[in-house]
Image (spheres, grey):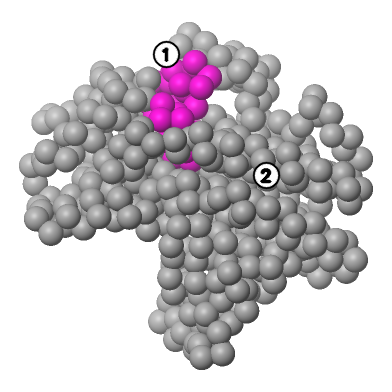
Amino acid sequence: MSPGPDATTAGAGAALAERAQRVVPGGVNSGQRSIPGLPGLVVAGTGGARFRTADGAEFTDYHAAFGPPLLGHNDPDVARAAAEAGAVLGHMGVGVTEGEIRLAEELCALVPSLEKVLLTSTGSEATFHALRVARAATGRRLVVKFQGCYHGWHDSVSLNVISAPDRVGGHDPISAGILPEVLDATLVLPFNDSAAVRRCFAEHGADIAAVIVEPVPHNVGALLPHREFLTTLREETAKAGSVLVFDEVITGIRHSLGGWQQISGVTPDLTTLGKAIANGAPAGAIGGRADLMELFSTRPGAPAFFAGTYNGHPSVVAAALATLRKVREEPVHDHVFRLGERVRTGLRTVYERLGVPVAVTGYGSVFVTYFMPGYDGGADRAPRTYTDLLANDAGLFVGYRRRLLAHGIFELPLNLKRSHLSYAHADADVDRLLEATEAAVAAALADGGARDLEHASTMGGATRAGAEGAAR
C-alpha cells in the first residue's frame, strides 16, 4: 500500500473537496467525516481491508466506517447477493417480501431477546422507536442513559457522550435546538455504577419508562461492563416495570451472532441492531418481547407509530442475509478475534518498549489504546467508566494516529475512537500496524504533541463539550 498520492491524480482530492464545499455544508454528509488537518479527503475506492483516495493514496483501514464492514469492504458474496436481489426486485414500499420474512426469522433465531423484529434503515431510527414504544407501553416519562454512550441523533439521547470534565454529572447536550423539557426527561448515570442505578430507581422508578445502554460503550473506545452492572439493570427494570433496551448497533453481530446479551447472559426487553448486520449496507432493526413489538402501528390499531419508506429494501435485506450466512458458515469470528488478540498483545509490548503508560483494551475485533499517565497496566485498573477516560492524553491519542497516515494506515484521528479488524485483514496487516504504531508514537513523543493537543480540542476530545465527539 502506498500512502503517498499518485503523480497522475495528485490534487484531484482537493479539487473535489472544493466542489463539495460549494454545495454540501462543510463538504461532508455526516458530522465526523471532516477531519481537521486532513483537508480534501475524498474516498475513491474501497476493497477488503483497504481504501483509496482520489489523490491515489492507499491505506489499510482500521476505522471501518465506525464498524459496519465486519467482512471487509465490498465483500464479494454480500455484493453479489445485493446485486442479484436488485436485478429482480425493486422496492415497493407496500406489503412484505420473502427476504424480509427470512431476515426476521434469522434474527429472532440468533438474538436471545428477539421474539419479533422490525427493520429500519439506521441504528438511530431503531433506538428512537425503542424509546417511543417503551413510553407507549408504560405511560411513563423518564428515560435513563449513561455517560459515554451514544444512541443516535434524536433529542432524548443526544447528550453526555464525550463530555468535558466540568460537564460530567450534568446534562451535556451534543446539539443546539433540543427542547429543555426533552432533556429534563432524560436521567444520565455513570456507566458500570450499580449503586447509582439502584439509587435512581429508588427515587424515580415509578416514572422510568426505559433504561437504554450500550452494553459495551464503544463510542468512547471500549469500556467493558461488569456483569453485575448489567444484571443490576435487568433486576431494577424488572422490579419497576421499566423497559430495558440494549443498544447493540455496534456489539451485535460483530462480537457474537447473538450480540453481547448472548455473551453476558443478560437478556433485555428490546434490542437495537445495525452496522455489521449487513456489512455496511444501510440496515437497522429493533426487536424484542412480542407484547412490546405488537404495540407498533404495523399492526392495525396499535398505538406506537412506526414507518420508514426504505425499511426492508430488497437489496439491503439481501446484503444482511448474505452477511449473516457468511458469519455463520465461515470462521469469521475466529479470525477477527485471533487478530484482535494479536493486536492488543502486540501493542502492549510496543508501549512497554517505548516506556509509555497505556491501557490497551477492547474485545474481539475491536481495539483501542488509552494514554494514561501513571497507569501501571494492572488489569484491576483497566478503564471502566467515562471518568477514568478523562486521564487519557488526547494530544498523543490524536497525534500518533495522524502520523500513521504517513505509513499507509488509517485509524480515525479523533479522541477516544475505537479501531476495528475485519475478516479481510491478515497477519501481515497486523505486523505492519504494530511496526507503524511504534514509529508513529515515537514521532509524536519527539514532537511534544502540542499541535496535536490543539487539534484534539476541536475534535471531540474530553477537553471540551460538543457534538464532534458524539457520532458512532
Q: Does the magenta stretch include residue 128?
A: no
Give whichever of discs 2 and 1 has the lower sequence position: 1
Count every numbered label the image shows and give the total.
2
* Residue position marked by numbered label 1 in the rendering: 241
Q: For label 2, count other residues whose C-alpha is less than 10 Å away and answer few (under 14), some (14-19) or many (20+).
A: many
Label 2–label 1 contact, CB within 8 A = no
Q: Residue 343 carries which label?
A: 2
Query: Given the image, on which type of amino acid does mark 1 rest?
Result: Gly
Residue at the far top: name it: 239
Which range of residues does the magenta coloring cover? 242-271
Q: Residue at x 48, y 80 (%)?
A: 54
Q: Nearer the viewer, residue 281 or 210?
A: 281
x and y percentages locating residue 433 in the rendered image: 68, 55
| Three-letter amino acid code at the position of disc 2 | Val
- For the point 50% across and 88% down, the residue is 9
Q: What element carries label 2?
A: helix
Residue 178 position within the rendered picture, expressed as x and y whole percent measured from the top left: 49, 51
**Left-right relation of 411 to 462:** left
Q: Where is residue 350 in the image (x, y as percent from the top left)?
A: 81, 48
> From the viewer's perspective, is residue 125 above or below residue 30?
above
